[in-house]
């Protein structure tokens, strides 16, 4: 089932789709922190993340003519942001190293990691990000969407352009591979599972 836009946001999106620059500016300011954080989790560099987010907003603006105003805006925007961030990466090895560096930096403001990730102890967080860096790009991305950016299954389905059933199976497999990579650290290995168990009572 597709999530409906809040009335105010639906109006802003529709106005932006019809060329209202002021309406689009409101959407940019509303989602700038989220877009920057998403890019930062992929790139690991605050300046690069800001550039990627700004470029994504520009690309999104010029793509508005093809956007259906009745669809959720946030997943559509995040798909553009993550594509832009991935396009800026030269190699998987560099991505892994930057993600580890990003985890160890005490970020603040728009480029900081989520409250859930920040609440982990430094040693646990390093172990988690080291395990994430060892995953494939697809596994890492779906984990980031769910547990770092707190997207619902419906939002992930829109962002990844796939059915919700596919999201569930991909997330379950990625979580299993993450637990296997974490190995003998049970506290870390259980964190994603507990978050997933809470999903039904929070956001579906």
Image (cartoon, rainbow, N blue to C red):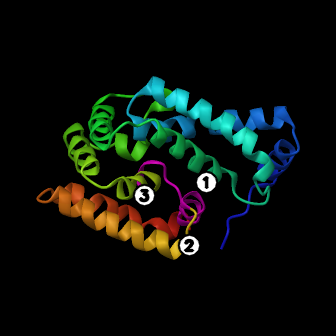
Which residue in the structure is indicated by mark 2?
Answer: 163
Proximity of marks 3 and 1: CB atoms separated by less than 8 Å: no
Q: CA distance from mark 2 to mark 3?
A: 14 Å
**Residue to which mark 1 is pinned:** 75
Query: Regarding mark 3 in the picture, which secondary structure is present there?
Result: helix
The residue sitting at 79% across, 60% down in the picture is 70
Q: Is residue 193 visible?
A: no
Residue extending farthest to the bottom is: 165
Instruction: Locate residue 119, reporting x and y percent.
Output: 34, 42
**Mark 2 / mark 3, whichever is N-terminal:** 3
The residue at 47%/66% (across/down) is 199
Residue 152 magenta-highlighted? yes
Where's residue 160, x and y in %? 54, 60
* Image quarter in which the N terminus is found: bottom right
Label annotation for residue 142: 3
Q: Judge by depth and name the residue closer to the eye, 137 or 185.
A: 137
Residue 10 on image: x %, y %: 80, 52
* Image: 22 above or below 173: above
Q: Is residue 100 left or right of residue 16?
A: left
Q: Earlier in the sequence, mark 2 or mark 1?
A: 1
Query: Within 10 Å of the Cα at label 1, are there few (<14), some (14-19), or many (20+) other Cα atoms?
Result: many
């Amino acid at each position: 089932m597709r999530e409906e836009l809040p009335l105010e946001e639906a109006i802003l999106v529709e106005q932006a789709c019809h060329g209202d620059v002021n309406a689009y500016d409101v959407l940019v300011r509303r989602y700038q922190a989220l877009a920057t954080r998403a890019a930062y989790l992929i790139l690991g560099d605050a300046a690069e993340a800001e550039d990627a987010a700004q470029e994504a907003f520009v690309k999104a603006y010029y793509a508005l003519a093809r956007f259906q105003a009745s669809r959720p805006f946030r997943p559509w925007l995040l798909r553009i942001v993550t594509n832009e961030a991935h396009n800026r990466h030269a190699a998987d090895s560099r991505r892994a190293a930057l993600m580890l560096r990003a985890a160890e930096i005490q970020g603040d403001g728009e480029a900081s990691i989520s409250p859930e990730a920040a609440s982990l102890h430094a040693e646990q967080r390093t172990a988690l990000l080291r395990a994430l860096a060892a995953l494939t790009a697809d596994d890492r991305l779906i984990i980031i969407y769910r547990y770092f950016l707190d997207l619902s299954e419906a939002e992930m389905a829109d962002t990844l352009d796939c059915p919700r059933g596919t999201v569930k199976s991909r997330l379950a497999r990625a979580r299993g591979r993450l637990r296997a990579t974490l190995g003998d650290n049970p506290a870390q290995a259980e964190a994603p599972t507990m978050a997933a168990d809470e999903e039904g009572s929070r956001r579906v």
